[in-house]
Amino acid sequence: MKNKKILSVLLAAAMAATLIAGCGSDGGKNDASGDTGKKENSNVTLSIVGIKTEIYDQWEAMQEEYSDIAGLSGFEMQVTGDETIYSYMQKAYAAGNEPVMAMLDPTDVYSFGEEYAVDLSGESWVKDTDWTISIGDKVASFPFCIEGRGIIYNKTAIEKTTGEDFDPSTIASLSDFTALCDKLVAGGMEAPVAIAQEDWSLGAHLFTLAYEQQDFTEAGTSAFIHEIVDGTVDFASNERYNSVMDTVDALRKYNIYANDPLSADYDLIASYMADGTVAFWFNGNWAWPNISEYVDGDTEFGIMPLVQNTSADDKANKMISGTATKQIIINNTASEEEQQAAKDFLTWLATDDEGKSFLVEEANLVSAFNNNTLENSDPLSVSVKQHVSDGTMYPTWNRAPGDHLTVVGGAMQKYLTDGNRDALAASVVDYWTENIDKID
Amino acid sequence: MEEKTFLGKTKHFLMFAGPAMVGFIAVVIIPFIYGLYLTFTDWGGIGNQKNLVGFANYITVFKDGDFWKSLLLTLGYVIISVILINLVAFILAYLLTSGMKAQNFFRAGFFTPNLIGGIVLGFIWQFVFTRTLPVIGQSLGIPLFEKSWLSDPTTAFWAFVIVTVWQYSGYMMLIYVAGFVGVPKDLTEAASIDGCTGFQVTRYVTIPLMVPSFVICLFLSLTRTFMVYDLNLSLTNGGPYESTKMSAMYVYQMAFNSQRYGVGQAEAIILFIVVAVVALTQTYLGKRMEVDA
């Protein structure tokens, strides 16, 4: 009896240990596709992880085609499943089964690039793009596509409701914007705006404008963050912060979810945008696959800047924020042949007609290369591309650590419900005070 | 006899328990010890650079107010959920062993939520709380349901509790059903003949004989609610504004999003100790209350 008790207590302890080990240290992630066995026929197998979910099908078709073109013995796409690309790569590096290439967000390129990225500065395509990420003196990544963010508008719905032509360039300040919203409300569109409640949208996309638009450069943004931490700048009374939040307040006022902002549903908003229930949504061109699902017939869309109550020559009222949001790195842990094959593949993507066509016409992305002049077919990408060629896109600041969006996104969710600007500023400054060592 | 010698015993033990032991050591013990080692390093999660930093991570943890807040929140959630889960499960089991009609159908029905994974379950309930209930509330004018429950910290917490109870009480019910069925008929009959009322039979005969069921159910519900992550992720994702972020999610985000692996791991160890102490104390106390028929 005594033994039985001891045994049961031990078993209980063992089970508790199982549970915690599962949480803490993630013992054995078994990667079914980890076998990148090389065939003897001097061919190599390429592998990549982190493909944008929107283009899985197109990518799979393309990689099969490319395998034939380049005589590869195989090309495989790994998926991260329900974890972030960051933790996937972390485990893959620890286990030594990382794929040859990885498609990362810019912030992850900075995390992994220094140690693991192959230097691409010798590649022929480098001169054709402004969007590579350099770490030290090496070119660490290949810019896969450009994405821009701003206020998405449904031109057709606006014109139908107001009965007037709509030209986004006439909306040059917040007062223009609210005047238009009032007109839309008068015309029968009860709430012309939608705000998503996702933390990445609020924290990483909307709020970050308050840093980026200090001087519209990446270096300037980093410097500004240092200043709010060391107290040189009082963030709560900062002019740009307040003018961005003024616009956020206007969005809140006309928000279709004004009564209960955190019940916003991403897919529903996409359908509201498509059918003209709302006319404006702060988001980016990646939202097109969601919106297009619900679009009927000819509806015109575009992206315009988040206009503010500042002078007419303020860049914020003319420019949208954008960057090459997906970057491919080649792992220096891959064999020489694999690295070369991966470089050839990237060159093909950037310079070959088929590669260019895949990116723009099949995957419907905005190319980061000047020599790729193909036309996109989706209206939001066309709009982003237009901003790029007009020079009305400034580079997104993408150095925020991984938890910035959860913390600041959370604070923004709170702001949507209570509108307390000082509390928001305080939590932002707190966050940066703790994490200032993570940015340059 | 062969079994009497030490070697013989070892051989027998390994024959039966060996394969499981190897698996257990490989996927639990070794990662656990390695994880313990990582708490003494400044490893950020990438690369091979690991410097020993002594107890610095633990000091950081003790200064990390948000972690203790999330632990306290988790504790509140665990207490409420465990009580409700077991209460509901016990009542269901009582009803479903009292010989009512179609009780097997109901048993299967109440057990079903447990067959749905936590992630899927979270999304289903998210839909219910953000879309279905507000529509019903607005059209019928019930103020309680007019807003999404997931957009306010208090209601989001209770929504989380409700889904947890819904998920686990069916499973615990089965264990209680087994407990009820396992009580020998002759004992309850004897008690009735001696003049016990139905309530007295349950209180003084059935429940004491069911203590093992209580011990198991409490243990399972305690550990599962303490370690909740999947439901937390898909139902509220820690929101609204990080007000429902339970410890496991906090630890995960510390290690992977904030990229402070050592600190996250140290927090996981502390969480482990808390859970182990609570679960073992409960098991020990429960075992003492067991009686033999």
Image (cartoon, coloured by chain):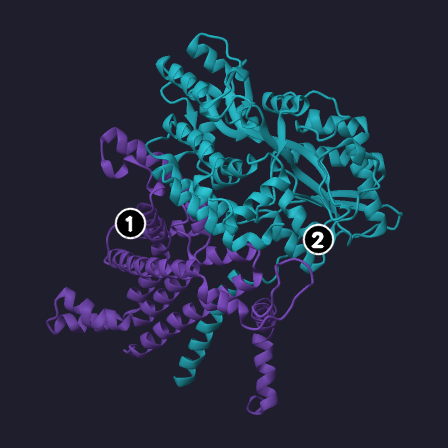
Q: Amino acid at mark 2?
A: Gly
User: Badges 1 and 2: C-beta atoms under 8 Å apart?
Assistant: no
Please identify the quadrant where the C terminus of chain B is shown: bottom left
- Measured from the top left, where is residue B76 in percent x and y? 32, 59
Q: Compared to A327, does A128 lie above or below? A: above
Q: Are marks 1 and 2 on the same chain?
A: no
Residue A289 visible: no
Residue A228 is situated, as x and y percent measured from the top left of the image, at 51, 46
Looking at the image, residue B34 sits to the left or right of residue A74; the answer is left
Task: Report the mark closest to the observer, 1 or 2.
Answer: 2
Within-10-Å neighbours for mark 2: few <14, some 14–19, many 20+: some
Q: Secondary structure at mark 2?
A: loop
- The chain displayed cyan equals A
Out of A98 and A241, give the one closest to the viewer: A241
Q: Residue at x 33, y 71 (%)?
A: B212
Q: In front here: B4 or B19? A: B19
Residue A246, above or below A181: below
Q: Which residue is mark 2?
A: A34
Q: Residue at x 72, y 33 (%)?
A: A61
For mark 1, does the 10 Å Cα neighbourhood hold few (<14), some (14 to 19), or many (20 or more) residues?
Answer: few
* Residue B54 picture quarter: bottom right
* Amino acid marked by disc 1: Ala
Residue A276 percent location from the top left of the image: 45, 18
In this figure, which residue is indicated by the disc labeled 1? B102
Q: Which chain is purple?
A: B
- Above or below, B158 against A248 in this view is below
**Along the viewing direction, whichever of A203 and A288 lies nearer the viewer:** A203
